[in-house]
Image (spheres, coloured by chain):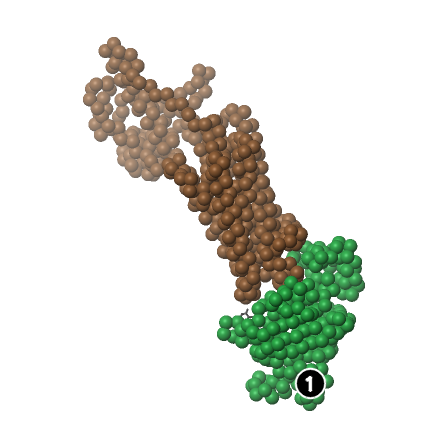
Amino acid sequence: MLELRNLSKTYGKHAALRDVTLGAPEGEVFGLLGPNGAGKTTLLRIIATLLQPSAGTAVLAGHDVGREPEAVRRAIGVVNGGMGLPARLTGREVLRSFAGLYGLTRTQADARIAELDAALDLGRTLDTRAGEYSTGMKQKVVIARAVIHDPQVLILDEAASGLDIFARRTLLDFVAAARQPGKLTLYSTHVMSEAEEVCDRVAILHEGALVTVGTIPEILAQTGERNLERAFFALVRGEGVRHAS
Amino acid sequence: MRPDYIWRVASRDLLSTLRDRRTLTSTILIPLLLIPLFTLGLPLLLGKFIGGQAQERQQVGVVGTLPESLRAALTRDEKTPDGTVTRAGVRLVPVTDPKAAVQSGDVDAALRAPSPLPRRAGDGTGTLEVYAKLGNLRAQTGAFAKVQSTVEAYNRELAVQRLGTLGLGAQTLTPVTLAPIDASPEQERRSGQLAFLIPLLMLNFILTGAMATALDATAGEKERGTLESLLVSPVRRSEVVAGKLLATTVTALTTALFSVLGFLLSGVVMRAVLARGDTPAELTQAFGGQLTLTPGSALALLGTVVSAALLISAVLIALSIYARSYKEAQTYVTPLSLLIVFPAVMLQFSDFLTLSSGIYALPLFGSMVAILDTVRGNLSTGHALTAIAANLIGALLVGLLALRSFGREEVIFRN
Ligand SMILES: Nc1ncnc2c1ncn2[C@@H]1O[C@H](COP(=O)(O)OP(=O)(O)OP(=O)(O)O)[C@@H](O)[C@H]1O
Ligand SMILES: [Mg+2]
């Protein structure tokens, strides 16, 4: 479902992503882990056609990200922690307007909104203007908007940041339920415990380079540590990078 | 580009604009109220003020003595046959230092004759110094004007008396009388001297209206983190830019429409005020745009205004997409109003300049001249088309620039 080959990205002189090669099959939740500045957002933005890679290729759902950006955009839904909503529109208006952009009719859109209301408990957000939302309400509508067209690939970048335990629970349950044949969820976070809960496999990034990829048990076995956070420190130290202390 | 996608982008931005009370005020209420206030209030106020000057009895200082008949002429009131004072005389008070008296504000003007003044025409000449704050409109139109006209009338009277003793009539003084007849076309005359303000106000309101949507739809979207979600949807960049341009132009034109309604409103009120008849007509006429549009000139006006709105919108979008926040965008676009005000003020002197046809090919400025021509009823089709084409070409180029910016990651993710 996702194939990255020798992907690099530099901002001016700064290398944010260095020669990343990895693949993720359909039917799983694939985690992207790494501390601040590791390059997670950069990688996901390349996949989402928002950034051009400096080198390498990315193929998503059979479409090359650089050559068929429109087909890729049709196949993805994107959520990141910094996303907001038009303050003077209600949740329903936002969802309907995006449904239109994906070619859904009004009837299809309303049916899909009802489905998402049940899954995400949108409740009164639907008929309240976004300017009045709490962080949790906002993020639910942002997620609903990203999946309004039932995308093949869902990209979540720090989607749980700033959420309270209730909103986070809804999000994690939603991600777990999205683990379906034919679908892929990319889940980026720097919170290792979130990854442990929802991810089937994870890639660990550090300073733009891929440190390791594997299932969580594999990574724990490889490092002999009892949780992902300790495994991460072990891996980074093993690379000779002075970071954990 | 797919029209339905463009419209989806535009309608979202328009809905946001429509729900913002702040922008509703600046796009609808202000043009609707400010224009009548400006076009009616100013002349009425000025009329009252200048009218009041005639009724007021100003203090005029005198050093030494003046001929008795001149004193009488200065202090005499002008009355209608039924006794109402149309122009009050001045009050003469003795002073010693004329300059100091004027400067201290004790008197509005002061008179001093260095040598005795002749009491009869033909008995030599004399000088009467008039001290007043001549840069001051109140002094100029009040005490100074009264002294000036009284002395002119006094001279004439002495001359006529002298001529009488020689057996000659008053007409000896004016063998030739001048009769000015206004030969400007009816429409131009009725458009008033301050018609040059109409293009200024129109374009300025287009700018205000466009700002209400453009900034929110670009920098505002970036700031709120909604632009990214739009850019990862199947809408093409060109459709995003076209949609935002459409939304901005619609708001700009709405404001322009309400400013035209404002002009119509002041025209109606003006006619009512004139009908009451206690305000000098020439003053209200100064602004008094009574616009008469033929179908052709209405079409030219429409084309000019729409194309100007398109260009202004494109410029605002191209500029404000660079900004990280709404506030930053405001600082980028605020100076633009100067770009409109300066040329518009130049238009005031358009009578002195021989405008070459090339001027119409300047985007926006050509439109201002064309709007002024329309108001005065002398716009040529060629000039109108030139102005419209200049705006459209400008809008296309700037629109392409905006499109390029929307495709550049360092612009979209500038933070
Ligand atoms: N637009 C940009 N211009 C210059 N440098 C950038 C830009 N965006 C990111 N970077 C740099 O690239 C590196 C990777 O950033 P990125 O945002 O991809 O990391 P991240 O893993 O998402 O981090 P975080 O957990 O903080 O979100 C960082 O060092 C960052 O400073
Ligand atoms: Mg990030």
Q: Residue furthest top?
A: B167
Residue depicted at 71% across the width and 85% down the height: A218
Locate residue B369, reporting x and y percent.
Answer: 46, 39
Locate residue B6, reporting x and y percent.
Answer: 63, 53
Image quarter in which the N terminus of chain A is found: bottom right
Residue depicted at 66% across the width and 60% down the height: B234
Q: What color is chain A drawn in?
A: green
Left/right placement of residue B277 relative to residue A138 reads left
Neighbourhood count class around disc 1 (C-alpha, 10 Å): few under 14, some 14–19, many 20 upward: many
Image quarter in which the C terminus of chain A is found: bottom right
User: Which kind of residue does numbered mark 1 sit on?
Assistant: Ile
Q: Examine the rendered structure and indicate whether residue A244 appears above or below residue B308.
A: below
Residue depicted at 34% across the width and 25% down the height: B149
Locate residue B223, reporting x and y percent.
Answer: 59, 61
Ligand 1 lies under 8 Å from the Cβ of mark 1: no
Residue depicted at 23% across the width and 11% down the height: B166
Q: Secondary structure at mark 1?
A: helix
Q: Nearer the viewer, residue B33 or A234?
A: A234
Q: Quadrant of residue B131?
A: top left
Q: Quadrant of ligand 1?
A: bottom right
Residue topped by disc 1: A219
Locate residue B339, reporting x and y percent.
Answer: 45, 48
Q: Examine the rendered structure and indicate whether residue B200 appears above or below residue B330.
A: above
Q: Is residue B20 visible?
A: no
The letter of the brown chain is: B
Q: Is residue B394 visible?
A: yes
Q: Nearer the viewer, residue A141 or B408?
A: B408
Left/right placement of residue B186 relative to residue B140 reads right
Q: Nearer the viewer, residue B247 or A125?
A: B247
